[in-house]
Image: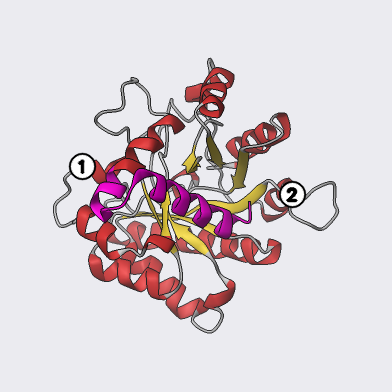
Amino acid sequence: MLIDTHAHLNIAAFDKDRDEVIKRCFENKISMINIGTNLETSKKAVELVEKYPSDIYASIGLHPINLDTGLLKRKVDKLEGGSFETEFDYQKYKELALQHGSGKAKSKVVAVGEVGLDYYLKPKTTGKKILFKEKQKELLLQEIKLAQELNLPVIFHCRMAHEDLLKILISNFKFQISKLSGVVHGFVGTAEELEKYLEMGFYIGFNGIIFKKIEGIDFVGNIKRTPLEKILIETDCPYLKAPDFPEERNNPLGVKLVAEYIAKIKKISFEDISNITTKNAQTLFRL
């Protein structure tokens, strides 16, 4: 059994064949967590866990690139669909995570995410850049607050912003970090940044980006440095397809190639990496 801890079968890219893809995943003993990126895709993730009795889980959250700060012109990603949101509606996201007002998080809504910081696209002027980043930071703190209220782990997205994310986590949660669990998904960072996340107890998610070459990033080294008990595997499908994945569009079946590559680097069997990463996912997300 494998668990794709970061999939997006809940977005527009899978509207035409979602059920077929899910069926193939089940046949190959692959389960998944579908990740919310705004209110619409979060709702769709929850709808999927209600439709399927087992092996599918959901997270709810507003991705930083889907926050309309009014400071940057953006186009909706055709693969994702949905829309931008001008503010985080705390109550609506909370209600989505709760089951019929019972006060307990739905058993299959297992995380708040993906949330975080994304500085890949940003305004050009200094003043707007500062305000743009501050708005993302404010959003992140609101979503962490929601995760803490619901006693759920956080799925962190971080692109070109590790310095700021680490500052937020260290400065705001250094006395209660044991109460804040989560994963830094699709980790692209330095060995030093990796070490800081691990010191705080976070899991590290690896996906198809580990097959790429990015200046200043040592993916093999990062995998070697990450303890087996802190590794999660994911696809981020339909994005970040592994080079040898035979299909045009990535899907949770591609998580097997990620697991095989990590097993090779760690010099352990595929069966062992499957068992270990599945146990890690079950532990973090209380599956």
Residue receiving disc 1:
212
Q: Position of residue 124 (x, y in %)?
A: 27, 51
Residue 106: which disc? 2
Residue 194 seen: yes
Vertically, is 258 above or below 157? above
Q: Nearer the viewer, residue 9 or 158?
A: 9
Quick check: 272 left or right of 224?
A: right
Q: Position of residue 196 (x, y in %)?
A: 35, 73
Q: Is residue 200 magenta?
A: no
Outermost residue, bottom side:
175
Quick check: 266 left or right of 13?
A: left
The residue shown at (38%, 39%) is 73
Whether label 2 touches label 1, CB < 8 Å: no
Outermost residue, left side:
215
In the rendered structure, which segment of residues is drawn in magenta?
261-287
Residue 88 seen: no
Q: Nearer the viewer, residue 214 or 273?
A: 273
The residue shown at (55%, 37%) is 31
Q: Name the residue type under label 2.
A: Lys
